[in-house]
Image (cartoon, rainbow, N blue to C red):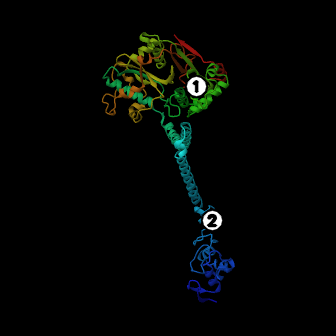
Amino acid sequence: MTSALDCPICNQHITGDDATLNFHVNQHFPQSPPHPSSTPHSLNNVAKISEHGQCPVCEKRVTNVEAHVASHFGGEGCNADEDGAEKVQCEVENCRKFVSLSDLQIHLDAHHAETLVRDERQSLESLKRKELTPDTLTAPNSKRANTEKNSEAMRGGNDAWQIKVEELIAGVGQIQARGKAMREAKEVRVACKSEGLIPKLCHLLTRSHARATGPYSTRSAFLCSPLVAHLASDISDAGWGCGYRNCQMILSYIAALPGVGGRLGIAGRVPDVAGLQAVLEEAWADGFDPTGAKQLKWRVVKTRRWIGTTEVYAILTYLGVRCTVIDFHKPTGPTKFHNLLFDWITAYFTPFTSTPTSALAALTVAHIRTTRRAPLYLQHQGHSRTCVGIERTVSDERNLILFDPSRRIWRDMSTLKVPEAARNKENAAGSAANGKKPVGFAGLSFAPAASPDRLLGPYRNAQKTVAKHAQYQVLALGDWDSQGRAVGGENDGEEGNWLVLSEEERYARKEPRFVRVP
């Protein structure tokens, strides 16, 4: 039965039965919390009401009716808010607040932070009190010195703690920067490979020949096969990976040869630097180049050790590629020029001639053409590059055309468009053999604003530049003599197949084969 009664304590008008009035009166005495049996009759029937989700006190629809009804009557036993979210009591002394589970960790962290701040303040205050005590002010010099020493030690400890925190923060920043660098490195690795440069170089040399405006203009040039790609060092191997990058350029030519790359297991792909390091260690374990293996202590994987001509020889021979090392151990011309080196490379890139003299004569005739020759690995003290051709200028100077892995390709070179006529004709300037200028290049209506000689600059290496180093080694694919002629019958009918070694030949070439010139 429901009736209207007045509270004897506060004279508040209470609507409900006797249990409701008793519960209200007990709220005026917090030292005696209400017993669950004294809760209103409606609270005892929560299970029945919860089916409808409606509060019997305020008639509000809630998700947790029992917790909501308990919130109308307060008390320390309430463990949920009016929306039914479960609460727990904070265990920290002088707090004991009820906090929702979702906010509990934040609440405890705030207590922890307050404790740290309080302890820090207490330590600083105690330190100040020790420094300003009458004993320390009137103590002898030794005692005051000890006090100052202790104070400095404590301050040093605090400074060391701050330095430690700063180092940790800096370490996190370095890890994040390293992760960003590695992500960018993947993009750089894609950008470091440039294909199709040989046709562009042929086009630029042809334009330089057609203009003939200065002593650096091209008279004739011979380039290697256009199958070779340029691979530049990235941030992962800058300063030490030139040998691997030049080896990759050689392998880019081999991988593109029809039928050859498949027989060697590298069809259409070139191993990365880490892969070449693993191949080199496998070659050493199989007995290839034992002298070089001993010098590098049989280990290059996950190191920054440089490799040279003999290591590249071991990699290629182990993969089954026929190759020869030609050693130019001293200058052979005036002013320390390497004339025999230039003569050998000239003979190499002019396969249609039979003697070095005829090769030099061919270079004096106005030809700009590409050949089917493989690129050459060129090593000197401290660095290596890939030779992709040779040029003679109007002033009768010879330049080596080199791919340098330490140089990135200029944007003007990357975006250079080769005309369709020049792209479809491998020997675009072949008609200039009789001293006539090539047809189709006189007007240069398609030429970009950049000068061809400027774009050719990073690839040209004159004799005086090559003379800066006393010794050179050349690694050439195939068998070669000291005159730049192929040994054993180079088969042009089956391009590249003569490069593949049989299993017997492969193991017979474990020691590098050198040809000394002179």
Contact between labelled residues 2 and 1, with CB atoms less than 8 Å apart? no
Q: Nearer the viewer, residue 510 or 101?
A: 101
- The amino acid type, in three-letter code, at marker 2 is Gln
Label for residue 497? 1
Q: Nearer the viewer, residue 512 or 371?
A: 512
The residues bearing labels 1 and 2 have C-alpha atoms spaced at a distance of 83 Å
Q: Is residue 90 left or right of residue 238?
A: right
Residue 488, given in percent of the width and then of the height, sits at: 58, 16
- At 33% from the left edge and 21% from the top edge, which residue is drawn? 436
| CA neighbours of label 1 inside 10 A, class few (<14), some (14 to 19), many (20+) | some
Residue 26 visible to an observer of this rendering: yes
- In front: mark 1 or mark 2? 2
Q: Is residue 372 left or right of residue 286?
A: left
Q: Is residue 357 left or right of residue 241?
A: left
In the image, residue 340 sits, relative to residue 58, either above or below, namely above
Residue 433 image-quadrant placement: top left
Count of labels shown?
2
* Residue of label 2: 89
Label for residue 414? none
Residue 263 visible to an observer of this rendering: no
Residue 427, given in percent of the width and then of the height, sits at: 42, 26
- At 34% from the left edge and 22% from the top edge, which residue is drawn? 217
Q: Nearer the viewer, residue 295 or 78?
A: 78
Q: Nearer the viewer, residue 327 or 212?
A: 327
Q: Secondary structure at mark 2?
A: strand
Residue 326, given in percent of the width and then of the height, sits at: 54, 16
Residue 30 image-quadrant placement: bottom right
In the image, residue 229 sits, relative to residue 180, either above or below, namely above
In the image, residue 419 sits, relative to residue 32, either above or below, namely above
- The amino acid type, in three-letter code, at marker 1 is Asn
Residue 518, given in percent of the width and then of the height, sits at: 51, 10
